[in-house]
Image (cartoon, grey):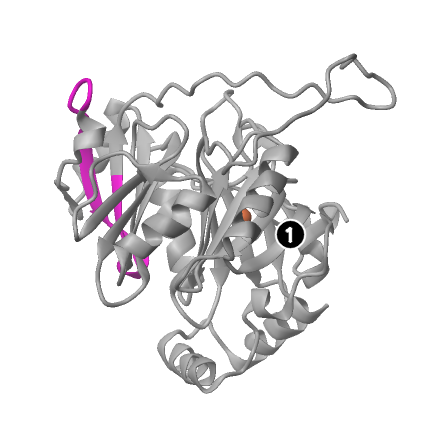
Amino acid sequence: MDSDPSLRAACPIPRHPAPTARVRRLARMTVERPDPAKAQRFFADFGLTPVEPPTADTLHLGGADGARAIYTVRRGPRPRLLGLTFTADADAVDRLAALDEASTPPALASDSAPTPARRIRLAGPMGLWVDVVARAPSRQPETPPETVNETRDAPRINRPVRLAEQPPAIRHLGHVALEAVDFDGAVAWFTGRLGLVPSDVQVLADGTPALVFLRCDRGPEPAEHHTLVIARSVEDGLNHAAFAVDDLDAVAMGQTVMRAAGWRHAWGVGRHLMGSQIFDYWYDPWGSLVEHYADSDRFDADHPAGVMPMSRSSMAQWGPPMPAHFANARLTPRRLWAIARGLRREPSLTIGRLLLLKRALSE
Ligand SMILES: [Fe+2]
């Protein structure tokens, strides 16, 4: 299934004509968890390790570079997303700093070396804070790629594949997927303030956008297909966080290690349609989804947005069927309460649209 040209002509989420700034990449997310030590055990198998000595209340985890935090855990009663950190050029940070909602966030030791970075904090949508920091990306250690023997081209001779059974090397935090009751407000904030642009939009049968994949606008320099996903929902919250690994072997080895450690698998291995990533999803100890992925599409600023109908079958090109628990479509008493609250709070959320959303997720 490819983008529908008749829908593309009228993309329901246009690019913002003059965003305050254009961020370069997603650098870090910060979550609240009741038990940071448990989070540390889970992520040790997933591929993240502390970059600063953990305290009883704070855990800063990083990937293979071992240098910078990409996932920070703060002790707190309610498992939830607290904030996101993006990087941008210094002049972009200056423009954001002039906004009324800007303040100065607390410094983080792993962000300070070798030179202190200029950073500002914005009050974002859904009660999230959004930090923007001016700094260069961290240098990644070199790992020689495994040479692949294909039927057309088989250069690996007299050299068997022997992979270490260990958590995959995580290169960066790739994207975060959010659920938003005020979908339009959240999309307007991230496109207007941070200059994110739509790569693909999925719409309901009545044309209402229900899912948008947003990427960083780096001009002629390609960026991954999505850095932020926003889904129209009855509740605000984090849907999943995705971490980039090198290749299919790394994704599948991640599954082998996580299964052996007894963590709860969610969905995969498969290949997405939107973004084309090879994916594998896991539940963390609080039921929040985390993803290993490889081989993302990359678009430069010229690539137009695709528009297509939303459907369950459009989530993957191959792989096992999406399990029912993954779509979170069960009507538990808690979910019914959330639906009632969402309908009361947000005028754009109607029973008709919720039924279209439910139908789309079951097709
Ligand atoms: Fe994802």
Residue 47 in picture, x, y percent from top left? 44, 39
49 lies left or right of 362: left
318 versus 76 height, above or below: above
Question: Circle 1 sits in a helix, a strand or a loop, which is it?
Answer: strand
Residue 266 in picture, x, y percent from top left? 57, 59
**Camera sees residue 296:** no
Which residue occupies 39% across, 33% down?
63
Which region is colored magenta?
A: 113-131
Residue 165 in picture, x, y percent from top left? 56, 36
Q: Quadrant of residue 54?
A: top left
Q: Quadrant of residue 146?
A: top right
Pick the front one: 224 or 98: 224
Pick the front one: 357 or 19: 357
30 versus 353 height, above or below: above
Pick the front one: 84 or 68: 68
Instruction: Tell me the residue that label 1 is attached to.
Output: 268
Name the residue furthest right: 151
Which residue occupies 53% across, 34% down?
245
Quadrant into which the C terminus falls = bottom right
Picture mark count: 1
Is 125 part of what is drawn in magenta? yes
Which residue occupies 41% across, 29% down?
64
Q: Is mark 1 within 8 Å of ligand 1?
A: no
312 lies left or right of 345: right
**Camera sees residue 83:** yes
Is 349 part of what is drawn in magenta? no
222 lies left or right of 267: left
Which residue occupies 45% across, 87% down?
333
Q: How many residues crowd mark 1 within 10 Å: few (<14), some (14–19), many (20+)?
A: many
Instruction: Look at label 1 and name its amino acid.
Output: Gly
Residue 61 in picture, x, y percent from top left? 31, 40
